[in-house]
């Protein structure tokens, strides 16, 4: 069924990635979940394997591969059962590096993109704010031009890799009176004078560092402006399509992992003289859950294929995240129930899966915000066009 999307090369890539994750990552997950800090050495190992260069040009050490390599990367990261570790990896490549791939000039790519591909620099994306949340146009962080620098003041929150990262792809108001038409994008060094971070204590995603960042008269060289001044809103909206699709793929992958685990457990667990996968109430419920997962998975693959062909899939990517994250929460909630008391024990995978999955309908645009975006498209007939720059 998936032969229409995945070639033999894709399948070989999946097998080698699985092996790599089992050898290099899985043995350390418990330690990183406990400490909330991922060993820097793993980033360079990912870089050496080319895993951070899937969408980057070969000129900057990337592999420039099609989007189904990204799907495989995301799916396999979900199967090691650490939403935090997975988030740190994909936020680096698909949040921060997306802007460098799209907007950076050659100097910026040499300074930030190439080291990111190699795993020597870790990036984060700074858009959400303590007072703004999903309302990007209402951001308060400002970047005021003074000679050959911009002076940045303000704050960002819920920033994955914001504590231990090396640079920030930052959205800031360069024209305070222009609303969403006054936002620009910058690349800022994380250790620049005036940047401070406080680590947030999260319900799930515990292996990743999530920061609230504050900027106090931070000087950013004018040369660190990404793309055109005041064009940031269109850049963010375009990048959101990929971010939402990434989160949709993550959701179907963790749901599939939960179902696989539950099926294995149910085939081995006995009650009243037979394995519990033989009880109609449980097997029929599992069929419903599996069907919902597969519908989302196939829709996500179809949307990835459209994006790969150059379509601007704002509507489809938004639906992908909205429906897949809701589905994943429901699947994992029920799979935890299939395990009975063991589902509630941290030594079994469902407890962490449930905590990690709950961020799905919140991060990267809440489900409520996504429904309003879709209402504008479906009810109000609003059209979102791809930025020309």
Image: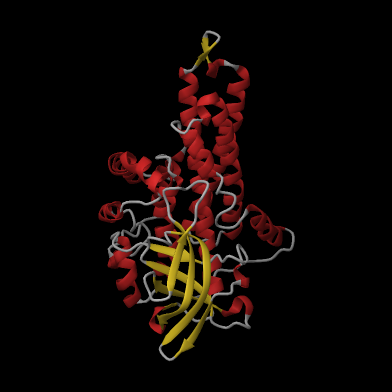
Could you tell whether 245 is left or right of 383 in the image? left
In the image, farthest residue toward the bottom: 147
The spot of residue 238 in percent (x, y) is 53, 66
Residue name at image x 45 percent, y 43 percent = 4
Residue 271 seen in this snapshot: yes
Q: Nearer the viewer, residue 115 or 82?
A: 82
On screen, 184 above or below 162? below
Residue name at image x 55 percent, y 16 percent = 278
The spot of residue 87 in percent (x, y) is 44, 52
The spot of residue 52 in percent (x, y) is 34, 57
Residue name at image x 50 percent, y 58 percent = 242
Q: Nearer the viewer, residue 297 or 349?
A: 349
In the image, farthest residue toward the top: 273
The spot of residue 165 in percent (x, y) is 38, 62
Could you tell whether 73 is left or right of 266 in the image? left
Residue name at image x 38 percent, y 82 percent = 223
The image's colouring method is secondary structure
On screen, 138 above or below 161? below
Q: Nearer the viewer, residue 37 or 84?
A: 37
Residue 103 seen in this snapshot: no
């Amino acid at each position: 069924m998936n032969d229409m999307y995945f070639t033999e090369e894709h399948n070989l890539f999946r097998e080698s990635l699985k092996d790599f994750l089992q050898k290099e990552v899985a043995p350390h997950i418990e330690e990183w979940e406990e400490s909330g800090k991922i060993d820097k050495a793993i980033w360079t190992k990912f870089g050496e394997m080319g895993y951070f260069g899937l969408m980057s040009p070969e000129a900057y050490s990337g592999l420039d591969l099609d989007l189904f390599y990204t799907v495989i990367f995301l799916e396999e990261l979900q199967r090691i059962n650490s939403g935090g570790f997975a988030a740190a990896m994909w936020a680096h490549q698909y949040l921060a590096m997306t802007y460098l791939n799209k907007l950076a000039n050659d100097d910026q790519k040499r300074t930030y993109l190439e080291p990111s591909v190699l795993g020597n620099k870790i990036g984060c994306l700074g858009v959400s704010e303590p007072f703004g949340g999903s309302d990007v146009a209402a951001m308060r962080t400002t970047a005021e031009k003074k000679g050959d620098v911009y002076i940045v003041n303000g704050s960002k929150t819920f920033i994955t890799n914001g504590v231990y990262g090396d640079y920030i792809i930052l959205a800031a108001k360069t024209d305070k009176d222009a609303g969403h038409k006054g936002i620009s994008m910058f690349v800022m060094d994380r250790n620049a004078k005036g940047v401070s971070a406080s680590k947030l204590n999260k319900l799930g995603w515990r292996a990743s560092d999530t920061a609230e960042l504050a900027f106090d008269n931070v000087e950013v060289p004018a040369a660190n402006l990404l793309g055109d001044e005041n064009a940031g809103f269109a850049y963010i909206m375009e990048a959101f399509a990929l971010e939402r699709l990434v989160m949709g793929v993550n959701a179907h992958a963790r749901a599939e992992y939960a179902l696989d685990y539950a099926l294995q457990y149910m085939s081995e667990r006995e009650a009243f003289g037979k394995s519990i996968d033989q009880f109609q109430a449980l097997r029929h419920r599992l069929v419903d859950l599996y069907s919902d997962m597969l519908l989302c998975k196939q829709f996500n693959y179809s949307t990835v294929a459209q994006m790969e062909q150059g379509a601007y899939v704002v509507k489809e990517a938004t639906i992908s995240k909205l429906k897949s994250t809701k589905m994943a929460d429901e699947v994992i909630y029920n799979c935890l129930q299939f395990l009975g008391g063991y589902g509630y024990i941290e030594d079994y995978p469902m407890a962490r899966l449930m905590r990690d999955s709950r961020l799905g309908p919140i991060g990267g645009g809440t489900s409520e915000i996504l429904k309003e975006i879709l209402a504008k498209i479906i009810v109000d007939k609003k059209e979102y066009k791809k930025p020309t720059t």
